[in-house]
Amino acid sequence: DTGVSQNPRHKITKRGQNVTFRCDPISEHNRLYWYRQTLGQGPEFLTYFQNEAQLEKSRLLSDRFSAERPKGSFSTLEIQRTEQGDSAMYLCASRQDRGSSYEQYFGPGTRLTVT
Amino acid sequence: DAKTTQPTSMDCAEGRAANLPCNHSTISGNEYVYWYRQIHSQGPQYIIHGLKNNETNEMASLIITEDRKSSTLILPHATLRDTAVYYCIVSFRRGGSEKLVFGKGTKLTVNP
């Protein structure tokens, strides 16, 4: 257990429905990252926050995806009008933004299945 | 795209050293080499990182060639719990997002 928690751990939804995932990072970590991982591939970067500011978004993050980190603590990732291609593991990671800190701590992920 | 090349899979006998190679011929001077691993159905786990010098911690050693175009992760005494996918990642460390760009990694199987 790295201290990063994600909920739910599994989500099954029908195509066209909206889903929201939550990530609770390690409390003193001000950087938070979202990644997506499909079967047989390495994780792909989606977006990251420094405190409450979303500073970078991947081209993978289409208009149907939105991420927030309202108070610089937990974060949510919402997918609207889900498609079968959204089926993947969604991983959250956090990091402390200090000079000697380099390690991203990953949560266990949320596995999304779109039927 | 990932900036690294790794073998798809490797096997190692339990108790022996596992040496995982990685090529990163286009690495730039301000980029670090990171190693993460992912055990089945878990999130990735940081192992070690380095810039130029060889590094060692309680999990592994990292050997970086003098020209920095390749590196080797060494697990000195592999156990069955080290069976995982190992990712070699090149990432700019100072400033910016320091996002991790994962490739497909090396699937290491430690055999009894």
Image (spheres, coloured by chain):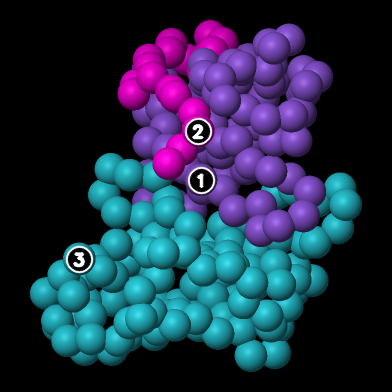
Chain colours: A cyan, B purple
| CA distance separating discs 3 and 1 | 21 Å
Check if residue B26 falls in the magenta segment. no
**Residues at discs 3 and 1 in contact (Cβ within 8 Å):** no
In the image, the segment drawn in magenta is B1-20
Mark 1: secondary structure: loop
Same subunit, tags 3 and 1? no
Name the residue tied to disc 2: B3
Q: Mark 1 lies on which chain?
A: B
Q: Nearer the viewer, mark 3 or mark 2?
A: 2
Does residue A75 appear left or right of residue B95 in this picture?
Answer: left
Q: Residue at x 64, y 90 (%)?
A: A70
| Residue type indicated by callout 1 | Val
Name the residue tied to disc 3: A85
From where the camera sits, is residue B67 visible? yes
Name the residue tied to disc 1: B101
Q: How many marks?
A: 3
Q: Where is residue A108 in the image (x, y as percent from the top left)?
A: 47, 61
**Residues at discs 3 and 2 in contact (Cβ within 8 Å):** no
Q: Residue at x 67, y 30 (%)?
A: B28
| Residue type indicated by callout 2 | Lys
From where the camera sits, is residue B75 visible? no
Mark 3: secondary structure: helix
Check if residue B4 falls in the magenta segment. yes
Q: Which chain carries label 2?
A: B
